Amino acid sequence: MQKYLLEFEQVYYTYPGSQESALNGLTLRIPSGKRCALIGQNGCGKTTLFLLANGLYKPDSGVVYWRSEPLIYNRNYLCNLRQKVGLIFQDPEQQLVASTVEEDISYGLCNLGLPVSEIKDRVAQALVEFELTNLAERPVHHLSLGQKKRVSIADVMVLQPELLVLDEPTAYLDVKHTRNLILTLQKIHQNGTTLIMATHDLDLVYRWADWVFVMDKGRLVLEGTPQDVFSQRSFLEKLELGVPLIYEMLFDGLSGEEEVVIERVRQKLLELFRDFS
C-alpha cells in the first residue's frame, strides 16, 4: 500500500480580495489507511486545505499531489479526482441538491453516466449501508440535521472514494447523532477508506484518531499520534487549543513511565470498544 494518498508541498493560497494568506507554505502528507484529525483555531486554514484537496481551489504556488502525482486542473482530471477524494461540508445544506433522499444519492452517479442498472444497485446498497431505506422517498428538506449529515455522507460514499474528507462533521449534532456518526465513520474506515476530519472536539480526536495534524496561521506546526501531540501541552496552550479533558484526567501529574502504562491501557480499551461497536 502506498504510504501517502494526498500531499501538500509548500502550498500557498490567498482568497481574492484578502490581504492575508489562508495557507502559508503548507507541507502536509495524509497517510494511507489512517483516521486523521486536523485541529487548529478558526481561520488557521483547515477548510481551505480541504477545498484544495479535491481541486475545488488551485494553489497560488506549491503543489498538491494525489498518489505522488501532481493534480491537473482540467475538467476530466478533476471529475475523476472527486470520485477518489470525497468532501463532506460542515453544513449538509451545501451538499444536498435533489428532491428526495434516493434522488440525492443517485445524483453523482448519474453525472458519471453509469448504466441505470448499476446506479440502482449502488443506491440501494447505500440506502441499506447508511440506514436510510425508510427515508428513501422522504423530501430532503423534511430531514433532521442528523439525517441530512448521514445523507451527505452516503452521497459521497456511493462514489466509492479512497479518501473521505470531513469538515466539522459533528458540528450542531447532539450526543446521540454524534455517536451514530462516529459509528458510521468507523464502518467506512473498516471497509478500507482513509479518513481526515477537521474538528474542535479534542476528546473525540483523542479517542478516535490514529494521527493528528495541528495547524496555525496556514502552516502545519505539529503532527503525530494523539499521545505524542497532546503531550505537547504547553505548546498547544500557546495556540489556545489546550488538551482533551480525558487527557488531563489521565496524565496530569504522572511520570513518563506512568504515562506509558496509562497509554497502553487506553489503547487496549479503544481496541475493545471498536470490536464491540
Image (cartoon, helix red, strand yellow):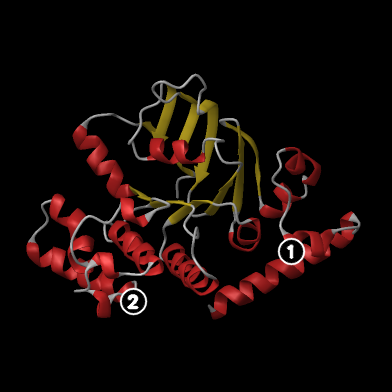
Instruction: List x then y, in percent, for residue 18.
Output: 45, 22
Q: Secondary structure at mark 1?
A: helix
Q: Position of residue 72 (x, y in %)?
A: 29, 29
The image quarter in which residue 69 lies: top left
Q: Which residue is mark 1?
A: 246
Q: Residues within 10 Å of mark 2 (few under 14, many from 20)?
A: some
Asked whether 12 or 119 is in front, the reply is 12
Chain-order first, disc 2 or disc 1: 2
Residue 246 x %, y %: 74, 64
Residue positioned 22% across, 55% down in the render: 97
Q: Is residue 231 above or below residue 266?
A: above
Report how far apart the C-alphas of labels 2 and 1 lie in the structure.
31 Å
Residue at 32% of width from left, 55% of height from top? 93
Instruction: Sort mark 1 into few (<14), some (14-19) or many (20+) by Cα contacts within 10 Å.
Output: some
Residue bearing mark 2:
131
Task: Describe residue 265's horizontal placement relative to residue 33 as left or right.
Answer: right
Q: Is residue 95 above or below residue 4?
A: below
Q: Residues at badges 2 and 1 in contact (C-beta under 8 Å)? A: no
Looking at numbered disc 1 in the image, what kind of residue is underneath it? Ile
Number of labels in the image equals: 2
Viewer-closest of 262 and 156: 156
* Side (left or right) of 67 relative to 38: left
